[in-house]
Image (spheres, rainbow, N blue to C red):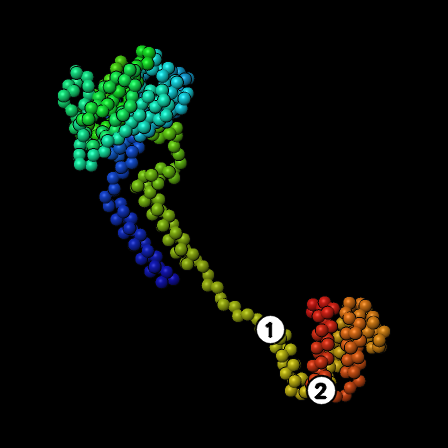
Amino acid sequence: MKDLKIYIIIATALFTIYVVANINRPKPVNWAETFSDTDKIPFGTYIVHDRARDLFPGAAIKIQRLPIYNVLTDTPPKQASYIIICGGIDMSKPDYEQLVKYIGLGNDVFIAATDFGSLFEKNLHISTKADFNIQQQNTAVKFLNPALHPESAYLIDRGSGNFYFNKFDTLKAVALGDNVFNKANFIKYRFGKGNLYLMSNPKMLSNYSMLNKQGALYAATALSYIKNTKQIIWDEYYTRGSGESKSPMKVFLNTPQLQWAYYISIFSLLAFVLFEIKRRQRIIPVVEPLQNSTLDFVTVVGQVYYEKRDNVNIAHKKVLYLLAYIRDHYRLKTNMLDQEFADSLAKKTGINVEFATKLTNALNFVSTQQRITDWELINLNKLIENFYRQSGYNGK
């Protein structure tokens, strides 16, 4: 009990030190490109979503986590603009057709992604490509509208602005912005009364870029192309999906403070159970196994007979026991040990007639002798054991 307490105290102390060290150590930066409006990590979009009311004064901001077709089919919003910021968008045909129809009614759609999927590539004839230059720390991007001073470039981290449109339909699309190599990275398509804005660098709308003054100014200018809107539909379907688990355990494990509280509770419960089991468990006495007195008795009797060398007595008892067994199990008379008895024994037990005759002769011989040698006793015992084995005797 004392040793167990010492071990538990040591384990508790080590676990406490481990927990405190993990709580207080600096958390590593999460560079995952989630582009989610709820994420404050570098490549989340918490800041731009939070400041959306400043960018679109008077407009209601509504988050949607359903496919575009579902959002626009039931009750299509009027004078509403759709904003999608994600790493890649693989739109289904019903979604694409509904989106084009929605734009044609006079609404604007703004999509920022590095990969626009096969439908966009096929219908809009666009594709994107990345330009990596490891020697260049930053890259310059600019807008082409003369009113936005295209000679004044925005200096952006090279990792945020290295994608551009290496192919797009110049007859239907208008380039609104490009990079230092004059490669378009912001274009517009006209559908009916509305506009489709495509940006090839979603990272330029991320928290990481928004913390930079020029990055924030670039993002605000790009989004300012959306005008006369009363509602902003902020898409989270392409970042977080249509739903996420609401289980309490997920909340616990996704929150560091609650996570450690959960682990500490489990550890404390285990320690309590161990203490209680050790404290309340009654001592189980050691019970010595009972001695096999029957075996001891047989051993003693055997030793007595062996020391006295009374072979006749032993042989007679073995014969009597065998004959009693034959009477009880096979209902044979044993007063006359002749050939008729041997034939009946063979028939009843299934043993060989010759062996039955040999056994009968041995029984007759022993019954009439006043002196029996060790060899004769051994031979008798072998015959009897062989009979039991052949007749299927199981000791009962």
Mark 2 is surrounded, within 10 Å at the Cα level, by few (under 14), some (14 to 19) or many (20 or more) other residues, namely few
Q: Nearer the viewer, residue 125 or 268?
A: 125
* Amino acid type, residue under disc 2 in the picture: Thr
As displayed, is residue 191 above or below residue 376?
above
Q: Quadrant of residue 164?
A: top left
As displayed, is residue 333 above or below residue 70?
below
Where the N terminus falls, by quadrant? bottom left
Q: Which residue appears at 75% of the width and 81% of the height?
A: 316
* Amino acid type, residue under disc 1 in the picture: Asn
Does residue 233 appear in this view? no
Q: Earlier in the sequence, mark 2 or mark 1?
A: 1
Disc number placed over residue 373 in the picture, else none: 2
Q: Which residue appears at 25% of the width and 42% of the height?
A: 27
Q: Which residue appears at 37% of the width and 15% of the height?
A: 101
- Nearer the viewer's eye, disc 2 or disc 1? 2
Which x, y percent locates residue 348?
80, 67
Mark 1 is surrounded, within 10 Å at the Cα level, by few (under 14), some (14 to 19) or many (20 or more) other residues, namely few
Which x, y percent locates residue 220?
21, 22
Q: Which residue is mark 1?
A: 292
As displayed, is residue 211 above or below residue 124?
below
Q: Which residue appears at 63% of the width and 74% of the height?
A: 294
